Image (tube, rainbow, N blue to C red):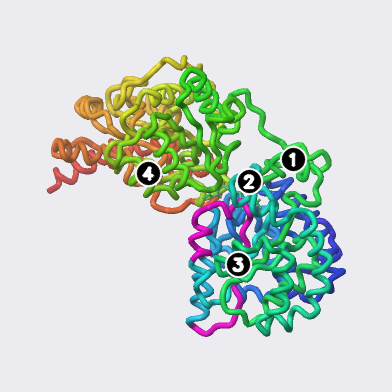
Amino acid sequence: MQNYRLLNNINYPTDLKKLNVEELKKLAAELRTELIDVVSETGGHLGAGLGVIELTIALHYIFDTPKDKLVWDVGHQSYPHKILTGRKNEIRTLRQGNGLSGFTKRSESEYDTFGAGHSSTSISSSLGIAVAKSLSNNQNNVVAVIGDGSMSAGMAYEAMNNAGITKSKLIVILNDNDMSIARPVGAMSSYLARLLSGKIYFGFRKAIKLVTSSFSEQFSNKAHKAEDFLKGMVTGGTLFSELGFYYIGPIDGHNLEALLPVLKNVKNSKHKGPILIHTITKKGKGYEPAEKAKDKYHGVSKFNIITGEQKKSFSKIPSFTKIFADTLIQHAEKDTKIIGITAAMPSGTGMDLFGNKFPDRMFDVGIAEQHATTFAAGLTTEGYKPYVAIYSTFLQRAFDQVVHDVAIQSLPVRFAIDRAGPVGADGSTHAGSFDIAYLTTLPNFVVMAASDEAELVRMINTSTIINNKPCSFRYPRGNGFGVTLPNITEMISVGKGRIVKEGKNVAILSLGARLQECLKASELLNQKGISVTVADMRFAKPIDQDLILELCLNHEALITIEEGSIGGFGSHVMQFLSNRGIFDKGIKLRSMILPDIFIDQDTQENIYKKAGLDSISIEEKVLEALKSNVVLSKAKSVS
Ligand SMILES: Cc1ncc(C[n+]2csc(CCOP(=O)(O)OP(=O)(O)O)c2C)c(N)n1
């Protein structure tokens, strides 16, 4: 850490409280410099944190954290909060193995009131905390900070709808930077923009000084005058007011002189019910390359502070995401019924590329995975072919929509499941661990997993002709393996796997992108005189029963492997074999899956090792399986 005049002496919020406003402003500058310096080394989320520097300082200055509860939505903007709450010296371990999480995490600090990673949970969790405090007559405040992008998700409205009728005091800060990861979309974002239209905002900035001196007293006396005054100035706050919130704003979220008195008054008020403070901030504030960037430096790799240039590991091999987008574009050129859908992740899913080509056929629905799914289901009923491109972890949000709106009606929604399996630095909240398990339980579904980018293309091709039921294909985060891509006419047979390497002793049934590791393991085993068959099973549903039976009959041991939790491909294979009575014949079966724990952030490679899904672990599993039989027969002979 650099030598900072103020920050060096700040370890906890109590240290902040010794400073005056001028010093807080200087501290904000130091904190900003430190944040830029840290993220230039670690990579991670930068723009959002830069936008809440003043807000973070103001909140910890005014409120009595951790007794007063502060809940950050998503948690990607919490790095400055971490620096001010006892984690300054560990901040450079962000997003690394055994280091700090890139999101808020209860086990990491008592200042992290509620863990996050997925968006739009903060109002619900804070309301729960606020109601609990009321029930136990605890007077401490509860503050949720939620971005305008995260306000696009249904959960935020469910929570506001409920908060509006409770008598518990809850403070919600709407951090409005007019950005999600990309530009925010939808009617809510237009509404917020209207609230800001020019003179109201600037008028308020000046007026706030006038208001706040008398505001405190009036506010605590139910604030009639102040409320009327504010409402008169900002008629646009009606939506929140109608929902039962006491609306205050918009306020310049970078102006400590405006923020501090408002927060103080709200803190001290005896208002019963929810209060919404609408702050306006700038994503990337104070760092020119971030302010100028299209995504405002939402998530960055390590970068050069002077130039802002990010140190992206250069690879000639395109990512799975890019190959998905390119392939879908090729199909969409021929088939005008193909539609692309993303839930606020246009660049992450490659849907931005699709949208550039087909602006009328790409829909960014906001952070609304549930809606994305049912919206797609609706499109299919009119003969369209929607592709919902979504990260595995975020599809979890839409499980009921997948079951109720898609699978039960057997509607041909295509799910392109990106970031399947371990994702690395984003940690357990973002790991794509469960999609195989939850999708394969559903009747009607075709569930595919690509072993490499060529297979991904074949699966996309095949999905275009699955017209009477839903299907999904999953692929991992990162670059492909550099294999030659097939033509977009090349299909695969539904429910059929393929043998990649033939052997005699052991069969490894691989589902998805661990195939290369299986092949490596087979080489290692060959050196030990064990001959291995490796199959790329392609389908988790329907499983290739014929191939599985055949491999069972011809091999001493059979190992399944997938980048997913229990309940997935391996479980289905075991279920099938047990029903066929295969266990009675003494075949040695093993399944390799993600372990039954949430694995914290680390490099993808380390996570594979920890999960036991790398080539060495596969080799060990095979040896153990073969040996176990020896142990078993020994035990038998002894008895
Ligand atoms: C359920 C869910 N979907 C998608 C995301 C990916 N995501 C992370 S931050 C973000 C944008 C949030 O925008 P906003 O709340 O305005 O915060 P800002 O980054 O602009 O400060 C998105 C879409 C997520 N975290 N959770």
Going by the numbered disc 1, the residue's amino acid type is Ala
Q: CA distance from mark 2 to mark 3?
A: 23 Å
Element type where label 2 sits in the image: loop
Relative to 501, residue 69 above or below: below
Q: CA distance from mark 4 to mark 2?
A: 25 Å
Element type where label 3 sits in the image: helix
Residue drawn at point x = 70 percent, y = 49 percent: 46
Q: Nearer the viewer, mark 4 or mark 2?
A: 2
Task: Check whether the beta carbons of the residues at disc 3 and disc 4 lie within 8 A of each other.
Answer: no
Comes first in the chain, label 4 or label 1 = 1
Q: Is residue 479 magenta?
A: no
Q: Nearer the viewer, mark 1 or mark 3?
A: 3
Which residue is label 1 attached to?
293
Comes first in the chain, label 2 or label 1 = 2
Where is residue 251 shown, x and y percent of the image? 75, 63
Where is residue 365 shown, x and y percent of the image? 54, 43
Residue drawn at point x = 37 percent, y = 21 percent: 500
Where is residue 149 shown, x and y percent of the image? 61, 51
Which residue is label 2 attached to?
184
